[in-house]
């Protein structure tokens, strides 16, 4: 067995870890605290590490001429492949853990125990930095525990340090329900943390030759209580402001102090660099005064890719006719031949994620480039480059895809393309954003207008419960109809049409002039017509637009503006 982590051992670790994730993929997918049929952490981890393995296999034999060690090159290939293939939040966080390992171990001639401990600490730092609002009881707690145990081992014995890290991760995983109430109520541990434990166990197997014991499968209680938890800051602040900033360290220190007086949920993360040099930073804060936050960024350096999200619907967005774009691109899969296009100065485009043929057709009619649902970082980056535009706005339409979109935006920035991610959480919000797009405005102003239009569109999803659970709206059983508003279960019913009508009534009770209905792939015939008729009778002055969306899992998506 190796007493260091050489390039061959890195390859064996990736293969063993991927095999373990595949064995437990379905089980990790089931560690989902929401009773809707889309828990896919296990799948996302498998896809992310598969991309890492493919990158390793393609370029492992070609060492760069900068003196990089063979094991450092292998780890960097893994990290880069994971970043480009990252799926969902779990995939993005995994890519950052691998990046932390690569950044540290790539600079040492041989990997011993203390080097692994330092690398796990760097991986922890990178993982926390990847999350705008870190929450304990998640994979972050698990990787932090592994790093602490590795440091406390205080040894150059690689096997001993790897064992200590894996054991501490397992214990930290068991504690996640004590840290996050939603996990305790659902009777499960954190899904991303479970995946990380499998990877650390695989590392122990590679460096020691000892096969770790198979983890005991998590068994759900017969009646698992459940509460959805929102990882947001104080409700006192109405807007989320996020932008990239080119500025020196000293100016960012002052910026942090200024933004801290304006709001909460403040996160400022930068690339490594000399304190005297200008560095690229990612700035995130919740505020009430958007202008003051952006002005603080201007005072510190050069802010760009500014995105603004309004948490609550303050005023209904007026109906708007989409302005014709200067450039039009076809919807659908991005041709590989288009990836060599050179961005034309001043040109703009929109890239939208769509799960459903009907939704994709709607976005294509608005001049957007459409990417199929649950894309990897690389697929989104390919779509951005295929537009041949210098400035691109990306609409992810799903909370998990937002992290992937942000990673693709960072990669595109390195290629000279300015990308702003408008954090849409539903296709109906993307339709509202595209409706106000205006190529005659400054790009930053146009992004802000799109973000405000998306934030002013409240959204709901109707699906059937996939498991028995206790939601904030009461207990549900498999097959019950669930109506989720802004991601939280608000209504539980037995009849699909009645529940759809009831959730629309609840949303319009707070005001609204336009209702958009997108019917899903498994929606019964006449669902949209029945809901439209109900709105016409109950809310005669409200305009209704209904389209076949074709999305999976959700028979109806609703938007209210």
Image: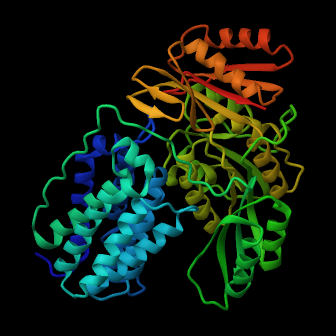
Q: Quadrant of the N terminus?
A: bottom left
* Residue 70 appearing in the image: no
Residue pictured at 68% horizontal, 13% vertical: 531
Residue pictured at 31% horizontal, 54% vertical: 194
Say left or right for 445 vs 483: right
Depicted 406 relative to depicted 428: above or below: below
Say left or right for 19 vs 327: left
Dividing the picture into quarters, in which one does residue 261 lie? bottom right
* Residue 521 appearing in the image: yes
Residue 311: image location, x then y, percent: 72, 47
Instruction: Kindly give the residue lying farthest to the right in the view shown.
Output: 440
Depicted 514 relative to depicted 277: above or below: above
Residue 257: image location, x then y, percent: 73, 78
Residue 101: image location, x then y, percent: 37, 74
User: Between 163 and 7, which is closer to the camera in this rendering?
Assistant: 163
Depicted 237 relative to depicted 156: above or below: above
Dividing the picture into quarters, in which one does residue 282 lie? bottom right
User: Between 336 and 548, which is closer to the camera in this rendering?
Assistant: 548
Instruction: Kindly give the residue lying farthest to the bottom in the view shown.
Output: 276
Say left or right for 168 vs 458: left
């Amino acid at each position: 067995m190796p007493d260091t982590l050489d390039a061959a051992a890195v390859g064996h670790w990736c293969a063993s870890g991927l095999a373990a994730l595949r064995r437990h993929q379905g089980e990790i997918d089931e560690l989902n605290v929401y009773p809707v049929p889309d828990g896919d952490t296990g799948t996302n981890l498998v896809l992310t590490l598969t991309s890492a393995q493919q990158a390793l296999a393609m370029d492992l034999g070609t060492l760069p001429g900068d003196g990089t060690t063979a094991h450092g090159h292998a780890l960097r290939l893994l990290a880069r492949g994971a970043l480009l293939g990252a799926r969902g939040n779990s995939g993005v966080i995994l890519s950052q853990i691998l990046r932390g390992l690569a950044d540290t171990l790539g600079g040492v001639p041989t990997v011993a125990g203390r080097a692994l401990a330092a690398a796990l600490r760097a991986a922890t730092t990178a993982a926390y930095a990847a999350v705008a609002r870190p929450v304990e009881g998640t994979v972050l707690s698990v990787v932090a525990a592994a790093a602490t145990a590795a440091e406390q081992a205080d040894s150059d014995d690689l096997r001993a340090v790897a064992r200590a890290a894996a054991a501490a991760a397992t214990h930290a995983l068991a504690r996640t329900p004590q840290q996050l109430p939603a996990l305790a109520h659902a009777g499960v541990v954190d899904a991303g943390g479970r995946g990380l434990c499998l990877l650390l166990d695989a590392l122990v197997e590679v460096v020691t030759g000892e096969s770790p014991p198979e983890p005991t499968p998590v068994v759900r209680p017969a009646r698992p209580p459940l509460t959805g938890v929102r990882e947001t800051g104080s409700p006192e602040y109405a807007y989320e402001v996020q932008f990239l900033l080119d500025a020196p360290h000293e100016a960012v220190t002052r910026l942090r102090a200024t933004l801290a007086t304006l709001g909460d949920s403040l996160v400022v993360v930068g690339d490594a660099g000399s304190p005297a040099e200008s560095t690229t930073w990612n700035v995130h804060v919740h505020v009430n005064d958007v202008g003051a936050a952006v002005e603080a960024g201007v005072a510190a350096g050069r802010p760009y890719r500014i995105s603004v999200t309004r948490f609550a619907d303050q005023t209904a967005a007026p109906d708007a006719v989409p302005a014709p774009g200067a450039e039009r691109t076809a919807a659908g899969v991005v041709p590989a031949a288009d990836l060599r296009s050179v961005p034309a100065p001043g040109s703009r485009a929109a890239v939208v994620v769509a799960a459903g043929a009907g939704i994709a057709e709607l976005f294509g009619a608005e001049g957007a480039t459409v990417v199929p649902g649950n894309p990897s970082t690389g697929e989104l980056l390919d779509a951005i480059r295929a537009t041949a535009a210098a400035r691109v706005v990306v609409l992810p339409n799903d909370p998990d895809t937002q992290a992937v979109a942000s990673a693709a935006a960072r990669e595109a920035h390195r290629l000279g393309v300015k990308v702003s991610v408008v954090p849409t959480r539903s296709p109906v919000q993307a339709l509202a954003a595209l409706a106000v797009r205006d190529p005659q405005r400054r790009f930053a102003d146009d992004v802000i207008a799109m973000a405000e239009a998306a934030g002013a569109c409240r959204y709901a999803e109707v699906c059937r419960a996939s498991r028995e659970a206790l939601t904030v709206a009461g207990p549900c059983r498999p097959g019950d109809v669930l109506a989720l508003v802004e991601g939280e279960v608000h209504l539980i019913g037995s009849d699909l049409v009645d529940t759809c009508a009831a959730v629309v009534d609840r949303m319009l009770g707070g005001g609204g002039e336009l209702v958009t209905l997108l019917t899903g792939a498994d929606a019964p015939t006449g669902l949209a017509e029945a809901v439209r008729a109900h709105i016409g009778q109950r809310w005669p002055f409200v305009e209704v637009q209904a389209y076949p969306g074709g999305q999976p899992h959700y028979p109806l998506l609703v938007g209210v503006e």
